Image: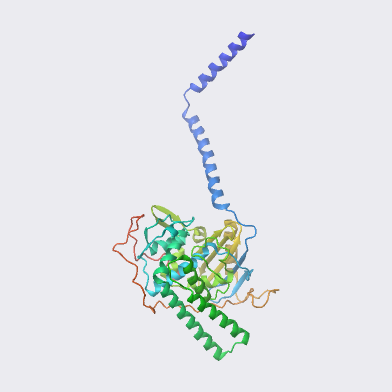
Amino acid sequence: MRRVIAWVGLAFAAVTIAVWSAPETVDARTSRHTARSGHHRVHHRRHRHHRRYLLPVSANAPTAEIVFDADSGRVMAIANADQRVYPASLTKMMTLYLTFRALQEGWLHLNDAMPVSAYAASASPTKLGLYPGQLVTVDDLIRGCVTESANDAARTLAENLDARFGRNLQQLLRNDIAAAQADDAADAASDPPSAQDAAERAGEINEMRALASGVMADGSEYDFARLMTLQARLLGMQDTVYRNASGLPDMEQVTTAPDMAMLAYALVHMPVQYYSYFSIQHFDFNGADHRNHNLRFLTSYDGADGIKTGYTQSGGFNVVDTARRGNRRLIAIVMGRQSLATREEDVRTLLDYGFAQTGTVTAVSSTLNEDVLTVGSTLDFPTLQTSGVRRIAPQLPDLVRPEPVTTAVSGRRPAPNRPAPISSAMR
């Protein structure tokens, strides 16, 4: 019996060896590799899917939304108008707004080279991967903020602007305060405000003056945030506080959907060579293609040309998007969503609803007080002080503009006069 079992075992082993040793046909080999590679591709796709779309969001992330006409200011839909929310990378909209103002004044130029500090380089992702001592052009830093939402680029802009032009921006904004006071006086002459309204406005002016006085121009991101907060007040963003230039988490850095509406309005009305940055779809830097985080909206929504996305765990998924169809431009803001997909769906729904509206929108009943915006309200847009005329001579020498300017990493010449991504007719 033992011999029988032994012979059966030897026979089985021989057959197995013969099968495994036989040449594999081409069809069989192709089928086997296709099955294996298919398995790995599916696994890889799932891995990327989880990394990109299943980012953690606090269940308590505050939410808000608004869609309005960028010309008339008419609100077509709004929710949680008085809810303070965390702006995340929407913060970079204000960083870029002040950068554009410096460019308008002629202090700054797109091909100026800015040095990267160790602090700026240490910013957590997303980032361009800048390193201490590197020289990067203003144009590249703007593109990095718009597309990759690069925190190291935002810090570099903030530190350099504050160090070189902090006093200039301080005086520029003080001029804006004086202009606002002159407007208030002219309005009061024809329509005197109530004692309460006058007292509240005086308090706002005093707060702006205090913010301006606190600017140190010490080249720090935190000091630049003072300028950002002051600019916010001048745009009518009374509930917004900035603590950094990037949008990295800070519980004191807050805003509201109506406040973001004021900033979006100001950016849309920037000269086209500045506003058009927000329509850039790709940015090549250091041999890497940085895709705009808002690429899906820009490439698939009719009339889309900006503006910015944002995400933090505590604030959720945020976006400020705008589109123009014919002679109508709408701006939609969605804050605190639980996923990228929900954010995308909701902002499209708001814009679709707005473009479908014709005539007058009737205000809906609300239990909120009359000072809170509702459907049918009209936003009180700020008076924009963006003449583009140099009103203040720089107090420091301009940034060095070598010929040609070459970034230390990319090794390419940035073109100082790159064509704008969109024409003025498409704004």
Q: Is residue 106 left or right of residue 174?
A: left
Residue closest to the eye, 93 or 38: 93
Q: How is the image coloured?
A: rainbow
Q: How many marks?
A: 0
Residue closest to the eye, 25 or 238: 238
Q: Is residue 27 above or below residue 223?
A: above
Q: Is residue 236 above or below residue 406?
A: below
What residue is shown at x 55% (from left), y 60% (from top)?
A: 249
> Furthest residue to the left?
403
What residue is shown at x 49% (from left), y 68% (from top)?
A: 225
* Any part of residue 290 in sight: yes
Q: Is residue 243 above or below residue 202?
A: above
What residue is shown at x 42% (from left), y 78% (from top)?
A: 387
Q: Is residue 136 left or right of residue 90?
A: left
Q: Position of residue 316 (x, y in %)?
A: 59, 59
Q: Position of residue 160 (x, y in %)?
A: 41, 66
Q: Position of residue 211 (x, y in %)?
A: 51, 75
Quarter holding residue 169: bottom left
- Image quarter where the N terminus lies is top right
Residue closest to the eye, 132 or 360: 132
* Any part of residue 150 in sight: no
Q: Position of residue 73 (x, y in %)?
A: 56, 76
Q: Is residue 327 left or right of residue 103?
A: right
What residue is shown at x 49% (from left), y 61% (from top)?
A: 298
> Furthest residue to the bottom?
189
